[in-house]
Amino acid sequence: MNKNYMEYNETAELLKILAHPVRLCIIKGLLEEGSCNVSHMQDCLEIPQSTLSQHLQKLRMAKLIKGERNGLEINYSICDERARELVEFLFKTKV
């Protein structure tokens, strides 16, 4: 066992971010869809836009997702391979 648990900080932070059901659902949905805009996510999740925006902000700040502007909308996609692999493993689906 390694006594230097501080080297696990980054992995622990990733797990904390993904530990919320809405954020986990967002990542899983992005895996399935490839990319998606806020309106589509809001319709699927049936949560207020302000709540969705807060979750997207946390995922962006953790650099798990990225947004690309397309006219007036922003399409989000996963940009962190660890998050992709972890969610695929958790749901045992290869998307």
Image: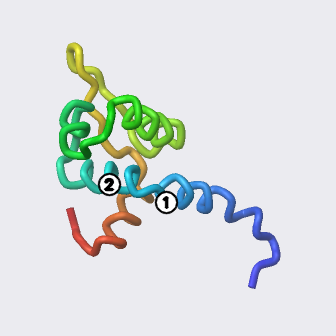
Q: Position of residue 28 (x, y in %)?
A: 29, 56
Residue 25, located in which quarter of the rendered image? bottom left
Q: Where is residue 69 in the image (x, y as percent from the top left)?
A: 28, 21
User: Is disc 2 placed on a helix, strand or loop?
Assistant: helix
**Tag 1 residue:** 19
Residue found at x 27% / y 32%: 38
Q: Which residue lies furthest to the bottom in this view?
A: 1
Amino acid carrying mark 2 in the image: Cys
Confirm or deny contact between disc 2 and disc 1 (CB under 8 A): no
**Tag 2 residue:** 25
Residue found at x 19% / y 54%: 32
Instruction: Of the two numbered discs 2 and 1 on the same chain, state the one appearing first in sequence.
Output: 1
Amino acid carrying mark 1 in the image: Ala
Number of other residues with Cα within 10 Å of mark 2, as a class: few under 14, some 14 to 19, many 20 or more: some
Left or right of residue 46: residue 27: right
Residue 61, compared with residue 25, is above or below; it is above
Q: Residue 8 carries which label?
A: none
Number of other residues with Cα within 10 Å of mark 1, as a class: few under 14, some 14 to 19, many 20 or more: few
| On-image quarter of the C terminus | bottom left
Residue found at x 80% / y 70%: 4
Left or right of residue 81: residue 72: left
Left or right of residue 92: residue 32: left
| On-image quarter of the N terminus | bottom right
Q: Which residue lies furthest to the top in this view?
A: 71
Residue 9, located in which quarter of the rendered image? bottom right
Q: Where is residue 17 in the image (x, y as percent from the top left)?
A: 52, 52
User: Is disc 1 placed on a helix, strand or loop?
Assistant: loop
Please say which color scheme the image uses. Answer: rainbow
Residue found at x 23% / y 70%: 93
Residue 24, compared with residue 88, is above or below; it is above
